[in-house]
Image: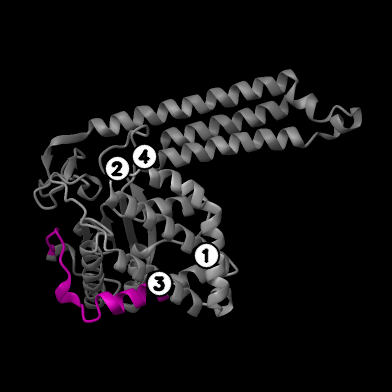
Amino acid sequence: MKLHNLLFTLATFASCCNALSNNHNHMKSRRATLENILLSTLAITSASPSPSNAVTDEGISAITDSSIGRSFRKSAIQGARVINNVDEKWAQFSDSLRDENKCDPVTGRRLFDNGFRKDGTRIGNPVLGALCRPEPLLPLDEAMAEKVLDIAVQCALRAGAAGGDAGLLNKSIGEVEDLVRASFERTIKNSVDEEERKRKLFNFAVYSKMRAISNALRSNDGASVRNFQLAWGRELVSQLAPFANRRDYSSPFPEMKDEFEDYDYNKDTLLDALGALKVSLDKLKSSGLIGHFEISIPYDDYGSVVTVAIDDYIPIGAEMLLSEQNYRIAGPGQALLRAVMNKANINYDLDTFYIDPSTTNQREYNPSQLLLSLSNLRR
């Protein structure tokens, strides 16, 4: 009974943690993780007989077929159902707070009814809301899309991928393409028009090259991948925004001088970095690789936070799949941001989110927005 009590406590604890968390944008992945933990625990328990079972040679069947085993499986299944039900209720509650009829006058995004600031203005988390007047994506410039990925391959070689051997890296990319082509082709065939087909092909190319590059860097660790991303981002900026600076930066949010003066970094170099980022993203937008985007320094956070929201981020499917498969590599959005911040000599913590700005309902959840959140900015 001690084993049963321990495992049941684990299931109950996981369920409670899930219910208490308010980060509903990650509910789906978190629930899957918890369910996998429960299933893995079942598998480990079934495959590892206790000393007493080993002596009586009862082994796996003694645990899986016993009343304890049946009871725990029932508890685990019920726990997963509770987790799913709590997530659904939270999604419904979150969506009920969305004001469908009002827009943030500054950003043009739907508001969440999260109360008011001290000055009486509404807190709306507009970065997470959908645009009130959606901006259609421009046609995909295939030459620019190819150029972005060619630069990635060249930078990967300079970062040491495949020992700097272009032939070996291209062979690795081809092997990944052959491995996953059938899966991607099924979705490509279901494209509603030629533009959607081009975007899905670009996703296929991003996934194949990023996975191969990650493998070719030998160690899929944060340092080697980050060095590659820095090199990729620097080269992109040098070609997309070679002369950009603080004069090119603009934000939908007004600068509040009374709360935006005490910095742990050089403000001018930050604005130079964000100017280069803005011009680079403008070029990607005009090429149909991304949609509407915003770069902001929320005054509520006293200059310690920068957020970059990119709607209709075309490589989002490839990046999510890579993340789910534990590849520590991302696409051009993160590469650009890392590069400009590195040039500004500003340290930061980076969180990446893939968001559906129109709903938190998991059954309808279809992420299309990349949200990059820099926090704890410092020298």
Camera-nearest label, 1 or 2: 2
User: Going by the image, does 294 lie left or right of 346?
Assistant: left
Residue drawn at point x = 21 percent, y = 40 percent: 114
Nearest the camera: 285 or 60?
Answer: 285
The residue where tag 1 is placed is 173
Q: Is residue 295 above or below residue 117?
A: below
The picture quadrant where one finds residue 351 is bottom left
Q: Earlier in the sequence, mark 3 or mark 2?
A: 3
Image location (x, y in percent) of residue 342: 36, 75
Marks 1 and 2 sit apart, C-alpha to C-alpha, by 28 Å
Residue drawn at point x = 42 percent, y = 71 percent: 152
The residue where tag 2 is placed is 192
Residue drawn at point x = 33 percent, y = 72 percent: 341
Mark 3 residue crowding within 10 angstroms, few (<14) / some (14–19) / many (20+): some
Q: Earlier in the sequence, mark 1 or mark 2?
A: 1
Going by the numbered disc 4, the residue's amino acid type is: His
Q: How many marks?
A: 4
The residue where tag 3 is placed is 150
Camera-nearest label, 1 or 4: 1
Image location (x, y in percent) of residue 21: 41, 39
- The part of the chain drawn in magenta is 231-256
Mark 4 residue crowding within 10 angstroms, few (<14) / some (14–19) / many (20+): some
Q: Earlier in the sequence, mark 1 or mark 4?
A: 4
The residue where tag 4 is placed is 24
Marks 3 and 1 sit apart, C-alpha to C-alpha, by 12 Å
- Mark 1 and 4 residues: CB-CB less than 8 Å, in contact? no
Within the magenta stretch, is there residue 312? no
- Mark 3 and 2 residues: CB-CB less than 8 Å, in contact? no
